[in-house]
Image (tube, rainbow, N blue to C red):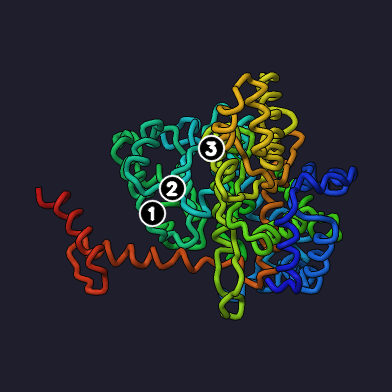
Amino acid sequence: MELSNASQMALQAKERTIASLFTNDDRAKSMSIKAASLFLDYSKQNINDDELATLFSWAKEQKLTENITRMFAGEKINNTENRAVLHTVLRAPNSVKQTILKTEADEVIETEKRVEQIVNNIRSGKSVSAAGKRFTDVLVIGIGGSFYGVKVALSALNPFCSPSLSVHVLANIDGGAVHEKLAKLSVDTTLVIVISKTFTTQETMLNAQAVKQWMRSNANNELIDFSELMQLQWYAVSTNITKATEFGLSATNVLPMWDWVGGRFSLWSAVGLPLALAIGNNEFSQLKNGAYEMDQHFLTSQFEQNMPVIMALVGLWNRNVLGHSSLAILPYDHGMRALPGYLQQTDMESNGKSVNKQGDHLSCATAPIVFGQEGTNSQHAFMQLMHQSNEIIPTDFIVALQGSSDLKEHHKVLVANCFAQSEALMKGKTLLQAQQELIEQNFDKEDAEQLAPHKVMKGNTPSNMLLLDKVTPYSFGALLALYEHKIAVQGFLWNINSFDQWGVELGKQLGQQILAVIDGGEDVSLSSSTTALISQFKSANFCK
């Protein structure tokens, strides 16, 4: 990050308290913004108006507007794979699809219609299993981008899910996970959806084979033709129709994917079919509408009033100027408990890079280390470290003003905890304050002086507060799009390619090599440590 006076600004920021910035009575108002049903208060960040203005000017100098425009126009900004980045077009009106995608728009629009028809047929009972029964369960098999988006949305939007059709997601290659899922299901009422662009992903296909064998073993083979069962009860989202049909699926049950949609941004495509089955077509459309509204805000708003740009620049300020290496995501909402994991992939897989788009080594840090969990649980876990260690961890708090249950008092306490933690992280507690509190609690002076250091909290931890009126498909779609765009902006400003993930490949390649050795092959390139570990595994499993 080449910001001319970054060192001087960092020194100034580290010498002040965030609380001292609130001598400006208008700070909370001027450092808040509303867009697409979301409200962002970033006034508890350790940044002042002049520093923020410097960042806005710098972003303009880095041609951020041009990069955003190029992305939405469909230029091939994923330079290492020579691909466009157009997940945004999937939530846009058909007229926009036709303008950007030209003739390919027809396939996209037709796919959306097919998804809607599948959803209608299954939810209405028109489409039934080979046993002639209505589907009660959907088992989704995928991993990575074919898993996280569906998982986080299913959890967040649980109040909108059909009570008569349960959707389960299977990603873990651990056989225990497979058995756990299958124990809840019946062959006669389960629909399977395999999500794999190539239909060759190792983990996905191994799980798919296990589920297929489970169905074969538990189907009533005297009454049901198994090939018919596969054609009625299995769907796929994939580019490889040949592999899918060889596996036993009907070609008409294979929905396409496109190379201009990255896995971690694919929820808006046919990958979202399981979610649409759970919440219905109308609510799935609302999810897209919320994302599209955030897209339009991002595309048309001046930087000073642009929520994704503001969050991105504040994040860069924390990462590159102030040197904070982590970002905590704390949703105070049980339904959004999977959001930190989703954003780990979206952020760190996108921007966890050390070379720029030209392949030159970067002199600055990029993606923060993202972690978190639902808020109230975090208060009794890692937030101890956030309050009392020397590490300053910027935080995004996320909470809905209206809860999803009828337990109003619970939600009031939840919101109070959320607001209190952001205030506590900012203000902290000085040694003098700790001593005074203890004296007021009737400790004598000597005991108060001994105990007080243990009760000091450093404060000065920056945070954003993101408010949703209520967690709905519309607001949740806007929230996901907000983070997508924030991450993209940071990638543009770091001059990295946020849309490839070559780091994922090495482990896959070595996994195949090691599997071959386990199966009796030889590989002298492996370290002695890994070779010894393989020997232990083989002894435990094959030499009893």
Q: Amino acid at mark 1?
A: Glu
- Provide the residue designation for mark 2: 171
Within the image, what quadrant is residue 187 found in? top left
Q: Quadrant of the N terminus?
A: bottom right
Circle 2 Cα neighbour tier, 10 Å, few/some/many (<14 / 14–19 / ≥20) = some
Q: Residue at x 34, y 66 (%)?
A: 510
Above or below, 138 against 6 in this view is: above
Which label's residue is closer to the chain start, 3 or 2? 3
Q: Amino acid at mark 3?
A: Ser
- Disc 1 to disc 2, C-alpha distance: 7 Å
Within the image, what quadrant is residue 475 found in? top right
Q: Is residue 149 left or right of residue 98?
A: left
- Provide the residue designation for mark 3: 127
Q: Is residue 164 left or right of residue 205?
A: right
Q: Secondary structure at mark 2?
A: loop
Mark 1–mark 2 CB contact (< 8 Å): yes
Q: Secondary structure at mark 1?
A: helix
Residue 507 locus on image (x, y percent): 39, 64
- Disc 1 to disc 3, C-alpha distance: 29 Å
Residue 65 locus on image (x, y percent): 80, 68
Q: Is residue 123 visible?
A: no
Q: Secondary structure at mark 3?
A: loop
Q: Is residue 300 left or right of residue 404?
A: right
Residue 34 locus on image (x, y percent): 83, 45
Circle 1 Cα neighbour tier, 10 Å, few/some/many (<14 / 14–19 / ≥20) = some
- Provide the residue designation for mark 1: 203
Above or below, 29 against 334 in this view is: below
